[in-house]
Amino acid sequence: MSTPYPTPVTANQTRIGWIGIGVMGGAMASRLLSAGYAVTIYAGNPSKATSLLSQGARLASSLAELAALSDVVFTMLGHPSDVKHVVLDTLLPSIKPNTVIIDHTSSHPALARHICDSALEKQCYSIDAPVSGGDIGARDGKLAIFAGGNSDVVDWLRPLFDVLGKATYMGGPGKGQSCKIANQITVGGNLVGVSEGLVFAEKAGLDKGKFIEAVRGGAAGSMVMELFGERMIKRDFRPGGFAQYMVKDLGMGVDVEEGDEDNVVVLPGAALSKQLFSGMVANGDDKLGGQGVITVIERINGM
């Protein structure tokens, strides 16, 4: 069966396509499979698809094949350049009318608007829906999803979003991406703050575990502390999102692009956070999780 928009989404009929099966994308696709949806995946490296195939996913040999087999196509890629290549240059030319594309990649708002316009020309729809919550949120279906685009289409997608987390409609095309940039500005500052608190606690001779336990219930407590505080202490820097992606996301908030000078927002804290995460990249830790920023603070302090 096929249930393109606006036919209601149902697990036994709506066909899902998924592009991007890394740490986040793989966990999210797995949840849809567990919820009973038929999921076709595309993988540049098919060996990474083994787990999803064991759950019943179908492996497409090309993006064109995936497009032909899908009513809704999810993408979870690395950089805006990947989104442009996969969605604009490859997927849209092959897609059927009334197909809905959901881009979960943290990307640029202007690109999201461009993709939306291009999809409409093909009688399709595109929703920018970046997420927050890391690998744990993806695994447990507790992601915060920031949706931008046509509000009716976002409402139509809610059965799918509900499997992955909680979706909040942020406004028209690109607004989901703008919300994600603001989210990353907030998360980046929090990661730096927790890192500095832990480094100071260690230098002061405090037990770092007791420090986290003592402050987590007060004003210093945060979701970032809950997700990453213990990981920092245990030197667990496995990625929910790569440090290099934090540099990319913060850059979309603080870097000035040619022709966009009138929309500059002065964000000195975010600019400093970007430099500290860039320090991780310079140290060869670009594929570690963002909680690894504590290693930069430690190096600055000779630890």
Image (cartoon, rainbow, N blue to C red):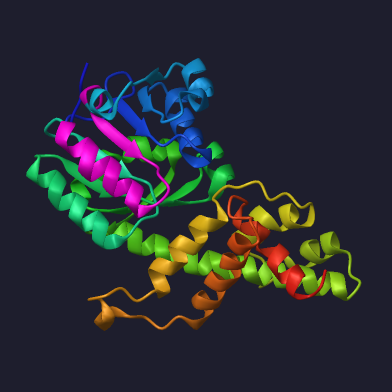
Residue 115 located left or right of residue 157: left
**Which quadrant of the rendered structure holds the N terminus?**
top left
**Which quadrant of the rendered structure holds the C terminus?**
bottom right
Outermost residue, right direction?
205
User: Is 204 situated above or below 249?
Assistant: below
User: Is 168 situated above or below 214?
Assistant: above
Residue 7 painted magenta: no
Percent x, y of residue 79: 39, 52
Residue drawn at x 64%, y 53% is 227
Residue drawn at x 34%, y 76% is 256
Q: Which residues lie in the magenta part? A: 68-95
Q: Quadrant of residue 2?
A: top left
User: Is 282 situated above or below 137?
Assistant: below
Whether residue 65 is visible here, answered yes or no, is: yes
Q: Nearer the viewer, residue 138 or 60?
A: 60
Q: Nearer the viewer, residue 175 or 103?
A: 103
Total count of labels:
0
Residue 165 located left or right of residue 87: right
Percent x, y of residue 232: 73, 57
Residue drawn at x 41%, y 37% is 20
Percent x, y of residue 35: 43, 25
Residue drawn at x 56%, y 44% is 135
Percent x, y of residue 294: 70, 64
Whether residue 217 is visible here, answered yes or no, is: no
